[in-house]
Amino acid sequence: MSFYLRQKWCDPRLRYTPNNKKLEKIKMEGDMWKRIWIPDTFFRNEKKAAFHDITVHNRMLVLDHTGYLWYVTK
């Protein structure tokens, strides 16, 4: 089975005041997701789990100026 996992949470330490409308949301590029705390999500009744090897990580992280983060992985 393959699916998208979407998570949203608020980290008040990451709040900022945007200078203009374009900076209200920032898409975190590259390996920036490694520098941000991401919840350790797990499936309680899993019997077996594996990540398939890929050349590029299927991840996206967007930071909102209010401190909300939106994280998507496949």
Image (cartoon, helix red, strand yellow):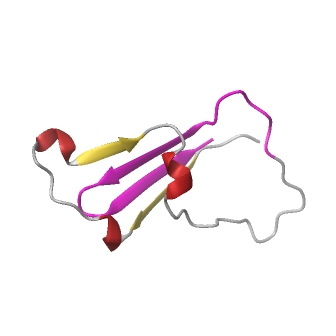
Whole-percent x, y for residue 43 in the image: 73, 65
Seen from the viewer's position, the closer of residues 2 and 21 is 21
Please state if 67 lies on the left or on the right of 5 as rendered: left
- In reply to whether residue 69 is colored magenta, the answer given is yes
Q: Residue furthest left?
A: 20
**Residue visible at 64% across and 67% down?**
40
Q: Is residue 33 above or below residue 52?
A: below
**Residue visible at 10% across and 48% down?**
19
Examine the image and state in which quarter residue 22 appears. top left
- In reply to whether residue 3 is colored magenta, the answer given is no
**Residue visible at 89% across and 62% down?**
47
Please state if 32 lies on the left or on the right of 40 as rendered: left
Examine the image and state in which quarter residue 13 appears. bottom left
Q: Which residues are magenta?
A: 51-74
Q: Residue furthest top?
A: 55
Q: How many marks?
A: 0
**Residue visible at 63% across and 41% down?**
74
Examine the image and state in which quarter residue 39 appears. bottom right
Whole-percent x, y for residue 26 in the image: 31, 44
Whole-percent x, y for residue 21 in the image: 12, 42
Whole-percent x, y for residue 60 in the image: 49, 42
Seen from the viewer's position, the closer of residues 40 and 46 is 40
**Quadrant containing the N terminus in the rendered view:** top right
